[in-house]
Image (cartoon, rainbow, N blue to C red):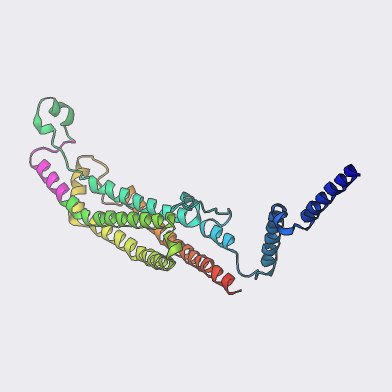
């Protein structure tokens, strides 16, 4: 009897503990509730996506389209992203930079070429033997040619100086807009995109009179009597390359100017498209908070 009563007593102690485990509820089920909570969160998110207006793009879609039209963009927490350079706007701004660089190079070639005649034959000796003869200017003729070279060089400087200045300014502008895009400043201040578009349109339209003035001024220089007299003196000695015509650098500079008429309006269109996308990205969180 004592042993049986002791067994019954121990079983009675086990039953309340088992009942407490069965009736324990929230405290004993906290571990599996985490999966249920995440599952319900995913279901709510899926339901919210189905109820979203398909006409309004999501934040991920608009942010990726702002940087690239084909590849999704993942923000990594940095203030800048070099992937912007590979987008349509980044490539266009890089082309603007190289366009300004080419304008500076074409104008610099003619600016650095003074073309002054060197009277080496008048030094005598071997110089007279190698550089003298019927094709050499000596004495008063050499001084006259040098004077004409100096006058012609001063005459042709203004259009090349202005071209170099415009090309350098375009390079600085392209670098500034490219840096703003890399640091995502237009995303934080969208009106900058409208200002950029306005400047691009003005620059593109400004290229039209600039190119016309460039060729008109060069034609006036080559029709000047100084250039004609200089050409005649060099031709009398059989020297070539001193004709009063447009050279290769002049033509290349004009063609690059025509290219600028195309590139900058295209950049303005891309800036406007970027502004529209950024505005949609800014409006999306407000719409979510109003739901």
Residue 56 coordinates in the image, percent (x, y): 61, 69
Instruction: Residue at the far right: name it.
Output: 1
Asked whether, in this view, residue 261 is left or right of residue 166, the answer is right
Q: Which sits in the foreground, 291 or 265?
A: 291
Q: Residue at x 18, y 27 (%)?
A: 130
Residue 265 coordinates in the image, percent (x, y): 44, 64
Instruction: Residue at the far top: name it.
Output: 126
Residues in magenta, as a range: 135-150
Quick check: can you spot residue 255?
A: no
| Location of the C terminus (image quadrant) | bottom right
Residue 28 coordinates in the image, percent (x, y): 72, 54
Q: Residue at x 81, y 49 (%)?
A: 14
- The quadrant where residue 117 appears: top left
Residue 8 coordinates in the image, percent (x, y): 87, 48
Instruction: Residue at the far bottom: name it.
Output: 290
| Location of the N terminus (image quadrant) | top right
Asked whether, in this view, residue 113 is left or right of residue 66, the answer is left
Q: Which sits in the foreground, 239 or 250?
A: 250
Relative to 128, is 29 above or below? Answer: below
Q: Residue at x 24, y 59 (%)?
A: 220
Asked whether, in this view, residue 143 is left or right of residue 277, the answer is left
In the rendered structure, does residue 198 fall within the stretch colored magenta?
no
Quick check: can you spot residue 280?
A: yes
Q: Which sits in the foreground, 188 or 201?
A: 188
- The quadrant where residue 112 appears: top left
């Amino acid at each position: 009897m004592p042993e049986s009563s002791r067994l019954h007593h121990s079983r009675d102690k086990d039953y309340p503990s088992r009942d407490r485990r069965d009736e324990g509820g929230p405290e004993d089920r906290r571990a599996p509730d985490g999966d249920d909570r995440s599952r319900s969160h995913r279901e709510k998110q899926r339901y919210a996506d189905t109820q979203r207006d398909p006409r309004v793009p999501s934040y991920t879609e608009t942010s990726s389209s702002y940087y690239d039209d084909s590849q999704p963009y993942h923000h990594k927490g940095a203030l800048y992203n070099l992937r912007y350079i590979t987008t349509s706007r980044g490539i266009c701004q890089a082309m603007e930079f190289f366009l300004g660089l080419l304008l500076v190079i074409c104008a610099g070639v003619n600016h650095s070429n003074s073309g002054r005649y060197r009277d080496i034959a008048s030094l005598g000796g071997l110089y007279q033997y190698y550089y003298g003869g019927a094709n050499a200017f000596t004495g008063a003729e050499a001084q006259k040619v040098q004077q004409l070279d100096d006058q012609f060089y001063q005459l042709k400087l203004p259009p090349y100086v202005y071209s170099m200045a415009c090309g350098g300014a375009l390079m600085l502008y392209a670098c500034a807009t490219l840096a703003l895009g890399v640091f995502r400043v237009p995303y934080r201040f969208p009106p900058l995109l409208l200002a950029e578009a306005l400047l691009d349109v003005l620059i593109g339209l400004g290229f039209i009179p600039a190119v016309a003035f460039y060729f008109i001024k060069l034609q006036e220089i080559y029709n000047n009597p100084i250039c004609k007299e200089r050409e005649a003196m060099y031709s009398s000695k059989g020297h070539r390359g001193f004709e009063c015509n447009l050279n290769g650098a002049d033509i290349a500079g004009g063609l690059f100017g025509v290219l600028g008429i195309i590139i900058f309006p295209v950049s303005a269109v891309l800036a406007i498209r970027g502004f529209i996308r950024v505005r949609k990205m800014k409006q999306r969180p407000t719409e979510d908070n109003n739901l």
